[in-house]
Amino acid sequence: MPRKVRRREKRLYKTIAKQRISELFELAEKEALRNRMDRADRYVEIARKIGMKYRVRIPKKYKLLFCKKCYRFLLPGVNARIRTGRGKLIIYCYRCGSYKRIPLKEKSFAILK
């Protein structure tokens, strides 16, 4: 198989993987709002596996939606606490007790939108 075909295929696989990751995070959010956290956590797990398999980064807007320690979907008020303090956004996971601190600068506001 020629090299150009392989490169095209890789690009195609990566674009498909990005689309699937975004769809999975949208599904996870819907399921979390229906109080089905087990399904939401599973969707996050599948999205992470797809990202690792095809070497695709999870978009920044979705990185805030799951815990980096226990990989659970975070829904504020249900299994996560979000506070602001000292110029940082602080996300606390109720399940594992880890904190995620994100500096609040002009660049950070673009991530949250």
Image (cartoon, helix red, strand yellow):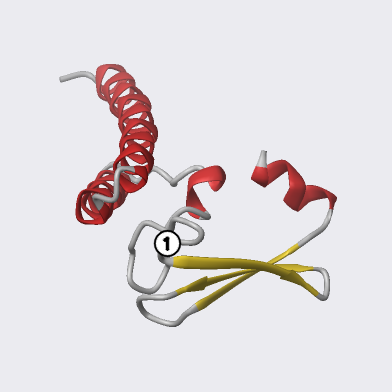
Q: Is residue 77 left or right of residue 6?
A: right
* Quadrant where the C terminus is found in the figure: top right
Number of callouts in the render? 1
User: Measuring 29% from the left and 50% from the top, which residue is drawn there?
Assistant: 35
Q: Which residue is mark 1?
A: 78
Q: Position of residue 45 (x, y in %)?
A: 25, 54
Front residue of this view, candidates 109 and 55: 109
User: Measuring 39% from the left and 34% from the top, which residue is drawn there?
Assistant: 22
Relative vertical location of residue 59 with respect to residue 48 in this rendering, above or below: above
Q: Residues within 10 Å of mark 1 (few under 14, many from 20)?
A: few
Mark 1: which amino acid?
Val
* Quadrant where the N terminus is found in the figure: top left
User: Measuring 28% from the left and 49% from the top, which residue is drawn there?
Assistant: 40
Relative vertical location of residue 24 with respect to residue 82 in this rendering, above or below: above
Question: Disc 1 on helix, strand or loop?
Answer: loop
| Res. 61 image quadrant | top right
Q: Position of residue 2 (x, y in %)?
A: 22, 18
